[in-house]
Amino acid sequence: ELEGVLQEMSRTIHQNPELGFEEHKAQALCTDLLEKEGFSVEKGTGGIETAFKARFPLGNGQGPRVAFLAEYDCLPGLGHACGHNLIAGAAVGAGILLRRLAGDVNGEVVVMGTPAEEGGGGKVIMLENGAFDDVGYAIMMHPSTENLVGRGGRATVKFDIAFHGKGCHSAGPEKGINALNAVILLFNAIDNLRPLLPTDTNINGVILDGGKACNVIPDYAHAQFSVRVRTQAEGEVVMEHLRRVIRGVEQLTGARAEYVLEPGYAERYPNDHIEREIQKTLEELGEEVERAPLMGRYGSSDIGNVTLKMPAVHTYFKIAPKGVASHTPEFEKASDTPYAYEQMMKAALAMARAGSRILSDGEFRSQVDEEFAQQVKAREEAKKQA
Ligand SMILES: [Zn+2]
Ligand SMILES: [Zn+2]
């Protein structure tokens, strides 16, 4: 019965894709269902209108708080090509299932709606505004082409830059300052930097504005870069290089740079103890689960920032055969199939059971906490080395 309700909710989200910070329908669908199940719901959590926090106290309510994170934003022009409709269904399902199977324990089941993962960084904003302060453990699962534990994610650096020059007729370029030249120099300088950058750094840029007419020297040019690095500490190193290069381009061209260059998403450290619990349930349900290296040329997500604050996981569950890439129309289709919804239910149960173990087993909980403490220590060491 719950299965049918969750699948319908997830399908409705899929059929009504909403961009980050505009997920009003998805928010209503999730919170209506949770309210019906006895959760008390707060909307607009952490200063984001389309966020929410739903709570269900267990026993006297004093004890560990386990949160399941629901994403529900879509991609511009591609609908739910990252399958966040399934993340929402799995998280809401996990909350409801944990409430039912928790038994005689003290603590709280929390389901949080975390908007705008695909750019916007809803979780980063919610963290900054204290929305995670009273949560002890964060659990979510993301659809993929395999069941995967152990995988981390890279950090990002936000980099957006405009150059202001001086426009003039292209017949007398010496009267102007060519802002496009500055952008082109910047691209070349970044290419020359690559040997100096930390391992696994990717920088990809696009020119968003390079002038309006070829017989006019552009007085303005605008570029944006996607920067991925293994850790935020390495991001600091990259930012230092970029600041130097920007100053050099200004000096060479006379154009003035106006830019944003700051840390974006943090790298991700999944909690292995929690992931092993999820793995156990998935395997009991007949799934094969693979283990990935922690670091690689991976993507980035705002769950990384959560993993710096508390034990957290972002485990992957299979909804499509290997080779179906996310962020494509094929993955959008794959996110709305009977198979995907079946897998979503397995993810919900696996997360609920992991949550139950955290709530009911103090020894397990201290292992989870100890692993997190070790990660914090290791991060401090890595920071010193970078
Ligand atoms: Zn995505
Ligand atoms: Zn995603």
Image (cartoon, helix red, strand yellow):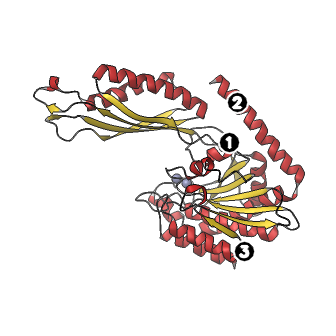
Q: Amino acid at mark 2?
A: Glu
Query: Sequence-wise, which precedes: disc 3 or disc 2?
Result: 3
> Mark 1 and mark 2: span between their CA atoms?
11 Å
Place residue 184 in its image quadrant.
Answer: top left
Q: Which residue is at 77% across, 57% downward?
A: 65
Query: Sequence-wise, which precedes: disc 1 or disc 3?
Result: 3
Say whether residue 280 is visible: no
What label sits on residue 184 in the rendered view?
none
Determine the secondary structure under disc 3.
loop
Q: Amino acid at mark 1?
A: Leu
Q: Pointer 1: residues within 10 angstroms few (<14), some, or many (20+)?
A: some
Residue carrying label 3: 38
> Mark 1 and mark 3: span between their CA atoms?
31 Å
Residue carrying label 1: 308
User: Is residue 259 shown above or below 244?
Assistant: below
Where the C terminus falls, by quadrant? top right
Dot 1 and dot 2 residues touching (CB under 8 Å): no
Where the N terminus falls, by quadrant? bottom right
Dot 1 and dot 3 residues touching (CB under 8 Å): no
In the rendered structure, the answer to whether residue 53 lies left or right of residue 370 reads left
Say whether residue 104 is visible: yes
Place residue 256 in its image quadrant.
Answer: top left
Residue carrying label 2: 380
The x, y position of residue 127, in whole percent, is: 62, 49
In the rendered structure, the answer to whether residue 310 lies left or right of residue 205 reads right
Determine the secondary structure under disc 1.
loop
Q: Amino acid at mark 3?
A: Gly
Between tags 1 and 3, which lies in front?
Answer: 3
